[in-house]
Amino acid sequence: MVLSHANDPMYWFGTEINSYDPRSQNEDLGNNSMKASEYGIKNLKRILPELEGWYKEEAEKYDALNDMYNQVVGQFRRYMGHVTKNIGGIYETPKSYEQTGMVYEPTPKALQKDAVAFLNKQLFETPTWMLDQKVLSKIKPGSGVDQLQSIQQSTINSIFDYARMQRLIETHAANANAYGLDELFTDVRSGIWSELRSRRAIDVYRRNLQKVHLEKMIALLNPADRTSSGGPGFSSPFAPPASPVADPKMSDVISVTRGHLVALRSDINAALPGISDKMSRYHLQDVVTRINQALEPK
């Protein structure tokens, strides 16, 4: 009976405890996090403009509006986490000896690329719908820049987590057609620094994002001393086995990072003569200086 349903996805069972299988996530029961999250964001875009009217109470302050806005932002953040887990993901399909096929296999390359494309579009292209000043002007002294940057920064930190990058290195070593670390760096850089191709002015949200990405890349050049670990600690007997995380200094991470910082500097220098916006020029000149200092410290 069990074997007859072995390849039926209706009978596949996963757990939230698995840290690297994108099919095992809380609040995510579908087979494509990108499509599900896109639908979810469409709903959030409909909800946000209505919040003030829905939670309006005479003689009351805007506490309820503030709470519900934070719920919208929190749900958006969860969608970003659901999608990010596809990058460097490893499917775990428990099997017994009489069953054929692999227990562990990388998330399909197409899904990983779709995940990065989703993040480039939905998060790294400024989600201006979240910055509704009709709402924010009533609940926050700022314009939402810090809150947005926090989500972008935590997502970038998650994308370039050492355990995730090592999984990409290993799966690409086993199969040259698998999604690899260099391709991840390229796809993220192409999205975050797209103004270098278009020569468009870089607004404050994108300048902040680009600095977050840059500083993460610089940090990867100088990793803190690490000992091999199994990643997140799992106490449950149902937790999957964790792979040890290699010392970044002994892996391709620093080499790839250095190569992409050199490429970014070259792209900026090529783009600067065609960028007329003053703040964009100041920003890019600063970025080049930071890259120079990181690559050639005195």
Image (cartoon, rainbow, N blue to C red):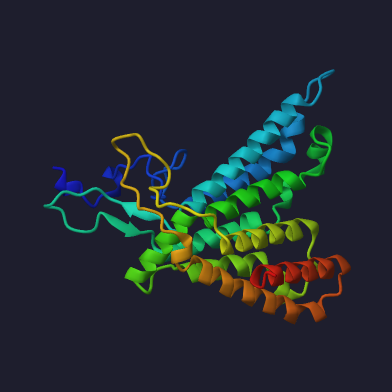
Question: Quick one: 87 or 66, which is closer to the camera?
Answer: 87
Residue 183 in percent (x, y) is at: 50, 70
Find the residue positioned furthest to the front.
298
Between 237 and 111, the residue placed more toward the observer is 237
Residue 199 left/right relative to 15: right
Q: Is the C terminus in the top left, top right, bottom left or bottom right quadrant?
A: bottom right
Q: Residue furthest left?
A: 98
Which quadrant does the N terminus fall into?
A: top left
* Residue 54 in view (yes/no): no
> Which residue: 72% across, 67% down?
290
Residue in the picture at 83% in, 33% down: 138
Where is residue 167? Give x, y as percent.
40, 60
Q: Quadrant of residue 270?
A: bottom right
- Asked which quadrant contains residue 292, the reply is bottom right
Please indicate whether residue 130 sits to the left or right of residue 181 in the image.
Answer: right
Residue 73 in percent (x, y) is at: 65, 40
Up-down relation of residue 48 to residue 197 (above or below): above
